[in-house]
Amino acid sequence: MTIYNFSAGPAVLPKPVLETAQSEMLDYKGSGMSVMELSHRSSWFQAIIDDAENLLRDLMKIPENYQVLFLQGGASLQFTKIPLNFAQNKKALYVNTGSWSKKAIQAAEALDNVTVEVIASSEDQNFTYIPEIPANVDQNAAYVHITTNNTIEGTAYQSIPNFGKVPVVADMSSNILANDYNVEDFGVIYAGAQKNIGPAGLTVVIIRDDLLGESDISAPMLDYTLLAKNDSLYNTPPTYAIYVAKLVFEWLQEQGGVAGITAQDQAKSKLLYDAIEASELFKSPVRADSRSLTNIPFVTGNDELDKKFNQEALAYGFENLKGHRSVGGMRASLYNAFPVEGVNELVTFMEKFEAENGGK
């Protein structure tokens, strides 16, 4: 039986990437060592991290005036690092679109010398849409923070709003490399790797040069400027995760880059959304103009029926379809590496389940 992993993260990786990692596990390119054994100061690893950065720059068209950092701590650590580096004794603006936005807001509010203002929120409708941005945004703010894709709620920005001269800081963890956003629209992009980039443990941070050096930070590992000056090697980085990320970037190039993989993602998500729209049993809780390509929640409206669906899905090899506890129902995470065959199989199973449970 084929297993299809719909996990929101850590998520499915491309099979060719796993096969390459397997083949090089004991001896990386004749070094006689595994990548996990390579010194981060060695020429072997320097070539890996340089290739990873160059590949990512090419894929995302990252301009030269942006630093690319490969760090530890996950996106959640950036919730504190962002205001600490950019908003001490200043105002920071936030758009609240779900669970991860709320955590970012709470982290900023915990800092005594940062003023936090939530300028828009979709909490009034349980985060089922992306809210409109006020026409007049404080142009003296240090930044405005958005979450481009909300993993739990299944919403996403279809385009990035115009915030004037205020730098846009984006948590792009669950749709980085799966969208056609323009890097130059952002001051900072950060993303945990475990959804569309590679294994858990790596965090990618992309920062415009003019934003560095703004704050005096006594904790070295929280100082983006210091980390950038040391090219992500101030301490031992997550070396193996960076290596696998490099392999994923190479695989993405073979898929036609971001444009090519985004077209694949659009086709995959359309299959599932069309099935949901055609169904009399399943419904999407998300407003149509705010729906995510990568995280697709759906429900029957009956908790017991949702539970039955999730139980039966496991027997068909569909892993991690159960929705987040705050939303319920089901959630299919269709990241870049998820195969279209898995979506077709899921749609077939949904039709069978509906026929057997009172649907048309």
Image (cartoon, rainbow, N blue to C red):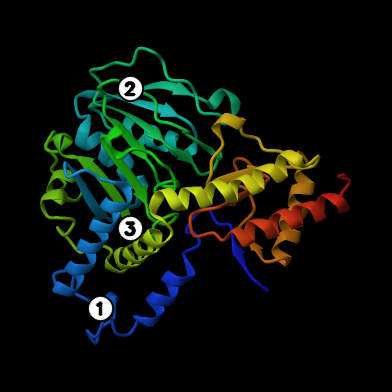
**Which x, y percent locates residue 311?**
73, 59
Rendered view: 314 above or below 151: below
Q: Quadrant of residue 343?
A: bottom right
- Badge 1 element: helix
Badge 2 marks a residue whose secondary structure is loop
The residue where tag 3 is placed is 202
Tell me the CA gap for discs 2 and 3: 29 Å
Q: CA distance from mark 3 to mark 1?
A: 17 Å
Mark 3 surroundings within 10 Å by alpha-carbon count, few (fewer than 14), some (14 through 19), many (20 or more): many
Closest to the camera, between mark 2 and mark 1, is: 2
Asked if residue 71 lies left or right of residue 228, the reply is right
Q: Amino acid at mark 1?
A: Glu
Check disc 1 and report the residue beneath it: 37
Amino acid type at mark 3: Leu
Q: For the residues carrying marks 2 and 3, which lies nearer the camera in this image?
A: 2
Circle 2 residue: 163
Pick the front one: 15 or 33: 15
